[in-house]
Amino acid sequence: MNLGGLFEGPHLLIIAVIVFLIFGAKRLPELGKGLGEGLKGFKDGIKNVSSEASAPTQTTTAPTQPKSDSTEVKA
């Protein structure tokens, strides 16, 4: 299935007219804003995942026990 010619100028114009008729002029800015915010959130999420994957993991060590004082008298 060849989709090379599907997204040419006349096809996109017909799709835009259909979307305009379905949603109307008042809803199109809201849809565009929602789509933009969604894409921005997606990109931010991808950046966070990739930065977490590339960051080295930190290992924690167990706390050390204090050394006992050798001057303590034991009975």
Image (cartoon, rainbow, N blue to C red):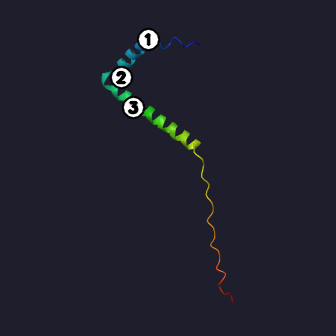
Camera-side mark, 3 or 1: 1
Q: Nearer the viewer, residue 25 or 64?
A: 64
Identify residue for label 1.
9
Q: Nearer the viewer, residue 59 or 28?
A: 59
| Viewport quadrant of the N terminus | top right
Q: Describe the element under mark 1 as helix, strand or loop.
A: helix
Q: Residue at x 54, y 13 (%)?
A: 4
Specify the amino acid type for callout 2: Phe
Q: Nearer the viewer, residue 34 or 51?
A: 51
Q: Residue at x 43, y 10 (%)?
A: 10
Identify residue for label 2.
23
Horizontal side, residue 13 vs residue 47: left or right? left
Tell which circle, 1 or 2, labels the residue nearer the N-terminal end: 1
Answer yes or no: do the residues labelled 2 and 3 have beta carbons within 8 Å? Answer: no
Q: Hey, which residue is sitting farthest right in the picture?
A: 75
Q: Position of residue 39 (x, y in %)?
A: 45, 32
- Mark 1 burial class by Cα count in 10 Å: few <14, some 14-19, many 20+: few
Q: Describe the element under mark 3 as helix, strand or loop.
A: helix
Q: CA distance from mark 1 to mark 2?
A: 21 Å
Tell which circle, 3 or 1, labels the residue nearer the N-terminal end: 1
Q: Which mark is residue 34?
A: 3
Residue 64, located in which quarter of the rendered image? Answer: bottom right
